[in-house]
Image (spheres, rainbow, N blue to C red):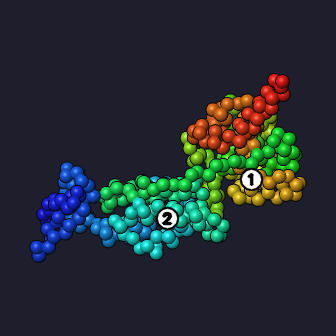
Amino acid sequence: MNGSLQKKGNMWYAVISLEGKKQKWISTKTKDKNKAKVVLRDILTKMENDLYIDPTKVKFLDFMDDWLNLVISKEIEKTTLESYQLTYKSHIKPYFQKLNLSLSDLKTIHLQKYINEKHENGRRDGKGGLGGNTLRKHKILLKSCLDYAVKMRLIGKNPIDNVVLPKKDKFTGSYYNAEQIERLLEIVKNTPIETPVFLTVYYGFRRGEVLGLKWSDVDFKEGTITINNTRVRYSKVSVDKSPKTEKSRRTLPLMKLVSSYLKKLKLKLNNNKMAMGKDYQDNQYVCCWENGQLYSVSFINHKLTKLLSEYEMPHIRFHDLRHSTASFLLKQGFSLKEIQEWLGHADITTTANIYSHVDMEMKKNIANRLDTRFAI
């Protein structure tokens, strides 16, 4: 099989000689002749081995579906894959299905219109569009898929690279003050969620971190507690997975109060194990029912919501206990860097963005004191 390069406009094309004096013109997607030569050799090699795929005949959605199920599924966490598949099935597929674009026909303008449409009216409940943070996740998913298409030389460049996203949503977390935290600890005492709430209040754990905590992660001798594992929701069941980031995998000092609490809890669970025998489920997790059975991930949120309503406390999510811990630490004078390490944020920007409202509150207190101190 023979081929040559021909220039049309400012782009190089691979001209492949087929049977019966027919020719097939294939764009190399480049203006650089040396790069075009590499593409030509690649096309000829694939054609000779019956491996060449014509991008004009590959539907974008077919390609993305194969990429999700055959390529990326082998490389990422199951929970991440589930999130990708949900975004694809709920948003990307329904939108692009009506356009019926081939991979080579997909342009930046199509992707920009997708982002704009989802921002304006993207929610399935009809209550407005998707936020900037959510659409960033959509772009990351699409970019990863189309980067693979570039790698496979099905397209010359990634059309989503120049897509403009809406501004990020400014997040302000709800949180309890010290008095409210003390009241909460009283409310949850002797309830099934006492332990996860107690540990989260002191350490600012994520829900998955506190539910994934095992007794092997608690070192009473060395006085440390380590996040090595998380438990998260996947396909309506709870599964173990690695911590969110390397920063999330952290070792913290075991406070005396927490150490005393955990020793009593471990003794209680050991007694339950002896009393229940085969009926006890020895899972080696710190947070569990009295028979050792593990909590479902969603149970923690539901139980907390019910208790707060029952005792007429301001509604917060379980994750907001983490914000409460961080807000308290910030007000106590700890630096953002110290709080970042304690919470396991990947970078300090995340910490600063989330807790800027507390920082402003502290500045207002300074302003009020100076205002009264130097009044004339």
Above-or-below relation of 299 to 24: above
Residue 239 lies, in percent from the top left, at 62, 56
Q: Position of residue 127 (x, y in %)?
A: 66, 67
* Callout 1 crowding tier (Cα within 10 Å): few <14, some 14–19, many ≥20: some
| Image quadrant occupied by the C terminus | top right
- Give left or right: position of 45 versus 258: left
For disc 2, the marked residue is 114
Can you give x and y, in whole percent of width and height, for residue 247 in the image? 58, 39
Residue drawn 42% across and 54% down?
Answer: 162
Residue found 39% across the figure and 70% down from its top? 101
The disc label shown at residue 62, or none: none
Disc 1 residue type (three-letter)? Arg
Which secondary structure, mark 2?
A: helix
Q: Nearer the viewer, residue 156 or 45?
A: 156
Q: Quadrant of residue 322?
A: top right
Q: Amino acid at mark 2?
A: Tyr
Q: Nearer the viewer, residue 130 or 341?
A: 130
Residue at mark 1: 317
Q: Position of residue 52 (x, y in %)?
A: 26, 65
Q: Is residue 40 above or below residue 356?
A: below
Of callouts 1 and 2, which one flags the residue occurring earlier in the amino acid sequence? 2
